[in-house]
Image (spheres, rainbow, N blue to C red):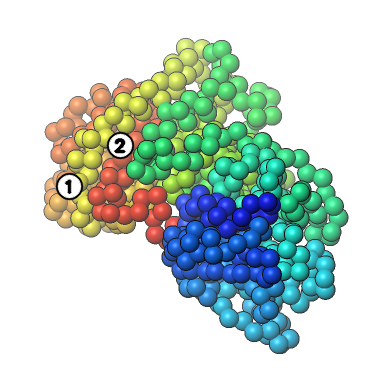
């Protein structure tokens, strides 16, 4: 959510900031703005709408000369999208400019305090409070003013701050909202995510909570919120720069779907040693793994859906009880955690606010936490006791595809590891599972090859009002993700239901011609699901079935069937989700939707 880019150095700042912000458009935003020191004063330009509006307003940055500046793309939280509410925000004199990601929770009393002191507010945002507070405490020392403000605000923030009195310095600060600092031979950068500055540098520093960075043309200095200077280690980003480009694909989402075979291979390969799975990142002995009595999986959105699949696979293979929680509910339900419990938090970005809060709540209760994340150096990666990276590379489209597939793969390997050390898989059974796991990339390639067939089918449902997904067991978990993919990028109302629940109210929604997508990949449940298909067909539904090759009987009950390659039923999600991703994509494209940047959504949800 929101994007920050800042630059100070030997080059013109505005074009660099605009280019960096363009790499963060996937995060979701409704307005954009920049503040540049032009040699005499801070010049500010803001515009509602897409970044292109700001680019045109500033002629690609040409009308905003200067070698130091900050920029922002805003996703509205406090105040409607407008030029006035867009960032940067300044003090009354325009000598201090601030960009901000996050939420200042105590902004209302702070705003009243500043109004009582004669400060006038022109926006509805919480961020403008920061600009006026810094002005209030500023007595010539920027660092002192910033740290005084940070001691007084509550909530989350990633900040970029520019002072007209000190145009040779940019300041950055962070708490619970991601922010990185980078450096090359021509200057220094701040950004809310790596793709923004990947073109310029691969040497970055991750700011920790309540740390402040001081950037000049020649270097970086870091401070605590108490102004104590800190020493920080840099991280080298080894992403392929092309990974953040479309590379000829129409959309990032389509490109990332086609990257899923490589993503799964990259996630599996480092953990295969001979004929065994070795997950060194767990930092747990076999004895410690055997001692785990219960697992809690905590996540949001698609990561939560991966966790639901993980529950079925872990319980089925390793016979360990698993609870799956939506992260925003986990800490507020006062969960019962005890000795022998294991907490697994899942997040693509590693910065998801509710998931991070759940991690911290678990650690505060003395629990060990394993993070499954995709971004090296992210908050969850740093704060979890152990981290299992998914190696999906940068995922730009808001609707996740390859990161979701990588999360499933990580959970499969965990389940297999637990099952083996607990003596529930003999050598042959483990070897068969491992073989099927290693076959997934090639099988996904085959399914992606059916895109023409799926596109043709999708074109029939561009005007659909409602589409329902049903399944049992793991198929229910697949249905959850398939439905989410469709609704988030096509804006068609869609719901997923456990097929056995149809008669408990849901079946009343089925009308003539309503599309029902029926998942049936679990052999033990084939006949049960066919019975549910017959029920919706009797009410006029058109049924698209997604099933495994041996389930030919489903053809008699369904109108359209997509067959999956043969694999272990526990891995069915990784195969079945591919046609559902393609279906959602082609429906959205056919409806003219902005597939990579769906309305009202953001890639990384860094506020509650």
Residue 95 against residue 265 in the figure, above or below: below
Could you say which is closer to the camera, residue 39 or residue 157? 39
Is residue 182 left or right of 596 when viewed as pictured?
A: right
Q: Is residue 457 left or right of residue 383?
A: left
Upstream in the sequence, badge 2 or badge 1? Answer: 1
Q: Nearer the viewer, residue 529 or 391?
A: 391
Find residue 50 and report its horizontal and vertical position in percent: 43, 61
10 Å neighbourhood of mark 1: few (<14), some, or many (≥20)?
Answer: few
Q: At numbered mark 2, what does the secondary structure look like: helix, strand or loop?
A: helix
Front-most of residues 273 and 135: 135
- Give the side of residue 539 with respect to residue 276, left or right: left
The label shown at residue 579 is: 2
Residue in view at x 70 percent, y 82 percent: 114
**Gap between marks 2 and 1 measured at Cα:** 15 Å
Provide residue 473's location: percent of width, then percent of height.
Answer: 37, 38
Expressed as whole percent of the image width and height from the top left, the position of residue 182 reads 67, 46
Most distant residue in the right direction: 228
Q: Are marks 2 and 1 in contact (CB under 8 Å)?
A: no
Q: Is residue 322 visible?
A: no
**Quadrant of the rendered structure where residue 152 is?**
bottom right
Q: Quadrant of the C terminus?
A: bottom right
Of 203 and 186, nearer the camera is: 186
Q: Residue at coordinates 16% horizontally, 55% vertically from top-left?
A: 511
Does any portion of residue 452 appear in the rendered image?
A: yes
Q: Residue at x 22, y 44 (%)?
A: 458
Q: How many marks?
A: 2
Q: Residue at 19% of width from left, 27% of height from top?
A: 552
Give the residue number, with chain letter if any, for mark 1.
460
> Badge 2, how many Cα within 10 Å: few under 14, some, many 20+?
many
Element type where label 1 sits in the image: helix
Q: Which mark is residue 25?
A: none
């Amino acid at each position: 959510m929101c994007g920050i880019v800042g630059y100070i150095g030997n080059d013109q700042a505005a074009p660099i900031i605009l280019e960096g912000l363009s790499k963060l458009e996937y995060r979701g935003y409704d307005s954009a703005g920049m503040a540049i020191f032009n040699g005499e004063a801070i010049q500010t330009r803001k515009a509602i709408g897409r970044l292109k509006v700001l680019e045109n307003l500033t002629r690609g940055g040409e009308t905003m000369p200067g070698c130091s500046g900050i920029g922002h793309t805003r996703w509205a939280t406090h105040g409607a999208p407008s030029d006035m509410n867009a960032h940067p925000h300044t003090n009354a004199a325009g000598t201090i400019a601030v960009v901000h990601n996050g939420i200042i929770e105590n902004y209302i009393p702070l705003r009243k305090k500043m109004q009582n002191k004669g400060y006038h507010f022109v926006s509805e945002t919480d961020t403008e409070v920061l600009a006026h507070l810094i002005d209030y405490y500023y007595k010539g020392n920027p660092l002192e003013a910033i740290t005084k403000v940070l001691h007084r605000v509550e909530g989350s923030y990633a900040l970029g701050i520019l002072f007209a009195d000190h145009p040779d310095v940019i300041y950055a600060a962070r708490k619970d909202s991601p922010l990185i600092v980078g450096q090359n031979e021509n200057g220094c950068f701040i950004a809310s995510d790596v793709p923004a500055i990947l073109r310029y540098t691969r040497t970055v520093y991750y700011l920790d909570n309540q740390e402040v960075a001081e950037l000049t043309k020649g270097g970086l200095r870091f401070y605590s919120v108490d102004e104590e200077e800190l020493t920080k280690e840099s991280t080298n980003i080894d992403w392929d720069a092309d990974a953040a480009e479309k590379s000829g694909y129409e959309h990032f989402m389509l490109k990332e779907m086609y990257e899923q075979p490589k993503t799964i291979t990259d996630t599996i390969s480092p953990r295969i040693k001979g004929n065994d799975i070795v997950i060194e990142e767990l930092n747990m002995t076999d004895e410690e793994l055997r001692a785990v009595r219960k697992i809690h999986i905590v996540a949001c959105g698609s990561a939560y859906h991966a966790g639901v699949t993980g529950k079925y696979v872990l319980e089925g293979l390793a016979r360990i009880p698993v609870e799956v929680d939506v992260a925003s509910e986990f800490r507020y339900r006062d969960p019962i955690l005890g000795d022998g419990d294991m907490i697994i938090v899942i997040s693509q970005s590693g910065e998801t606010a509710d998931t991070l809060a759940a991690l911290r709540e678990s650690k505060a209760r003395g629990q060990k936490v394993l993070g499954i994340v995709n971004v090296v150096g992210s908050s969850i990666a740093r704060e979890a006791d152990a981290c299992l990276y998914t190696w999906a590379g940068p995922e730009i489209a808001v609707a996740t595809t390859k990161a979701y597939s990588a999360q499933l793969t990580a959970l499969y390997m965990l389940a297999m590891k637990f099952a083996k050390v607990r003596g529930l898989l003999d050598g042959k059974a483990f070897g068969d599972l491992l073989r099927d796991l290693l076959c997934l990339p090639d099988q996904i390639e085959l399914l992606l090859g059916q895109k023409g067939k799926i596109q043709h089918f999708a074109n029939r449902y561009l005007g659909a009002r409602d589409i329902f997904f049903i399944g049992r067991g793991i198929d229910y978990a697949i249905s959850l993700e398939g439905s989410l993919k469709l609704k988030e990028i096509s804006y068609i109302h869609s719901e997923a239901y456990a097929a056995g629940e149809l008669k408990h109210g849901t079946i009343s929604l089925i009308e003539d011609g309503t599309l029902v997508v029926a998942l049936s990949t679990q052999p033990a449940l084939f006949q049960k699901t066919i019975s549910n298909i017959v029920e919706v067909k009797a009410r006029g539904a058109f049924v698209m079935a997604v099933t495994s090759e041996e389930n030919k009987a489903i053809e008699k009950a369904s109108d359209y069937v997509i067959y999956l390659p043969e694999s272990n039923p526990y891995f069915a999600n990784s195969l079945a989700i591919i046609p559902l991703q393609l279906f959602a994509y082609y429906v959205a494209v056919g409806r003219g939707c902005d597939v990579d940047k769906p309305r009202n959504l953001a890639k990384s949800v860094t506020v509650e």
